[in-house]
Image (spheres, grey):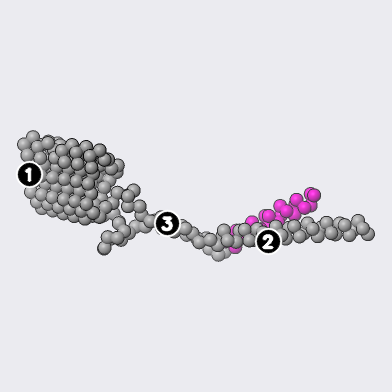
Amino acid sequence: MRITTHFHQHRGWRLAVVLVSALSLLVAFAPAQAAPPQAADPVNLEQSQIFNDDLTVRSGQTIDGDVVVYQGDVTVENEGAIRGNLIVYSGEIEIEEGGVVDGDITSFSGDIRIDGIVNGSVAALSGDVQIDSSAVVGGDVSVVSGAIDQDSGASVRGSVLRGPNLKLQLPAVPAIPGVPGIQVAVPAAPQPPSMIEMFLGLVWRVIRALLVLALAAGVA
């Protein structure tokens, strides 16, 4: 009789351990499954190199990648560099002697003055383009509405084109937070699992844990 009682007590302890473990798993997994997804990070303007104010690339400063300015003047000083394209929607552009733009320059509204080096093409939709004697332009210079003034000694390795019939390949308008009338393209947040998926996942974890504990109790 003592042996039977001891066996029943031992089996009861095992059952209690299994139940306590199951309850612990319920407490541990339920908050993790029900936790709301984290919101997507906001657009980082500094990394995107999108500006809505004046921009000066000072001597010795380099900006890697494309630069977009919605409203503001852009100046690239001597020994300053933009290692990409420069797009300005409303504002003046000046590339000083010794300044460098590795890509194309596109201006939607505003004058352009080049004393330095532009390795790509220069395109102005509405505004004058001044190419000084020290300037080097690796591609075409195109102006739809405005004048082109090229000093003696300036180097333009492509064509110089002007007129309202020009078909310019204009870049698409990227999104920027805080600018009226422009929609912000924010990456979509990951979709949370449905209630059924959370419930099934929780049940499976509990069943699997109970099976492991039961096997361990049977072997002991």
Which residue type carries mark 2?
Leu
Q: Label 1 crowding class (10 Å Cα cut-off): few <14, some 14-19, many 20+?
A: few
In the rendered image, which residue does mark 2 sit on?
23
| Residue 186 picture quarter | bottom left
* Residue 142 seen: no
Residue 40: give its label.
3
In the rendered image, which residue does mark 1 sit on?
149
Residue appearing at x 11%, y 42% in the figure: 131
Tell me, yes or no, whether the highlighted magenta stretch contains residue 212: yes
The disc, 2 or 1, on the residue closer to the chain's N-terminal end is 2
Position in image of residue 40 (x %, y %)? 42, 56
The disc, 1 or 3, on the residue closer to the chain's N-terminal end is 3
The disc, 2 or 3, on the residue closer to the chain's N-terminal end is 2
Relative placement, left or right, of 177 versus 135 is right
Q: Looking at the magenta stretch, what is its main secondary structure?
A: helix
* Residue 75 seen: yes
Which residue reaches farthest left?
Answer: 152
SS at circle 1: strand
Question: As displayed, is residue 134 above or below residue 19?
Answer: above
- As measured in the structure, the alpha-carbon distance from the residue carrying label 2 to the one carrying label 3 is 34 Å
Residue appearing at x 53%, y 61% in the figure: 35
Position in image of residue 178 (x %, y %)? 29, 60
Relative placement, left or right, of 201 versus 149 is right
- As measured in the structure, the alpha-carbon distance from the residue carrying label 1 to the one carrying label 3 is 48 Å
SS at circle 3: loop
Residue 10: give its label.
none
Tell me, yes or no, whether the highlighted magenta stretch contains residue 29: no
Position in image of residue 176 (x %, y %)? 30, 56
Which residue type carries mark 3?
Ala
Which residue type carries mark 1?
Asp
Q: Label 3 crowding class (10 Å Cα cut-off): few <14, some 14-19, many 20+?
A: few
Residue stretch rendered in magenta on the structure = 198-220
